[in-house]
Amino acid sequence: MSKLSEQDIETRLLQFPEWEYYENAIHVEFEFENFKDCFSAMSRIAFECEALNHHPDWSNSYNVLTISLSTHSAGGVTETDFKLAKAIEAIVEPEDE
């Protein structure tokens, strides 16, 4: 998997308005109603991570989930990071809401 150019990353981020690119990764922060909802989303995201064999750097503080995605073996952001970002968006913000 090859690292995407900064221009490619910025173009792809147009589909992910809440995400930002800095420090060689794409980042987002989600706020939930409570800890249970946050942890539930993290559990669902974990299954997607395993399916893609790609794992985020993330942290959780009560009802806030902070996620950073990059492909360490490629030295930056790749198509796989955007596949995972899309899966995360579908879990956290389902289209029917």
Image (spheres, grey):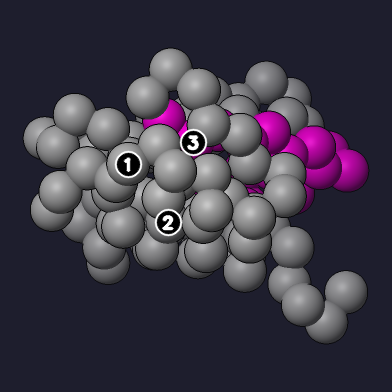
Quadrant holding the C terminus: bottom right
Q: Crowdedness of circle 1 by 10 Å Cα count: few (<14), some, many (20+)?
A: few
User: What amino acid type is highlighted by mark number 2?
Assistant: Phe
CA–CA distance in space, label 1 to label 2? 13 Å
Q: Label 3: which residue?
A: 26
Numbered range of the magenta stretch: 25-43
Residue visible at 15% across and 48% down in the picture: 2
Residue visible at 74% across and 63% down in the picture: 93
**Quick check: 73 above or below 93?**
above
Q: Label 1: which residue?
A: 5
Point out the tag, 1 or 2, that comes first from the N-terminus: 1
User: What amino acid type is highlighted by mark number 1?
Assistant: Ser
Residue visible at 41% across and 30% down in the picture: 25
Q: Say if residue 15 shows up in the picture.
A: yes
Q: Say if residue 55 shows up in the picture.
A: no
User: What amino acid type is highlighted by mark number 3?
Assistant: Ile
User: What x and y, as percent, mark residue 81?
Assistant: 36, 50
Which structural element holds mark 2? helix
Name the one closer to the observer, 60 or 16. Answer: 16
Q: Crowdedness of circle 3 by 10 Å Cα count: few (<14), some, many (20+)?
A: many
**Callouts 2 and 3 close, C-beta under 8 Å:** yes
Q: Looking at the image, is mark 1 or mark 2 nearer the viewer? A: 1
Q: Label 2: which residue?
A: 82
**Quick check: 13 above or below 44?**
above
Q: Crowdedness of circle 2 by 10 Å Cα count: few (<14), some, many (20+)?
A: some
**Quick check: 10 above or below 92?**
above
CA–CA distance in space, label 3 to label 1? 13 Å
Which structural element holds mark 1? loop
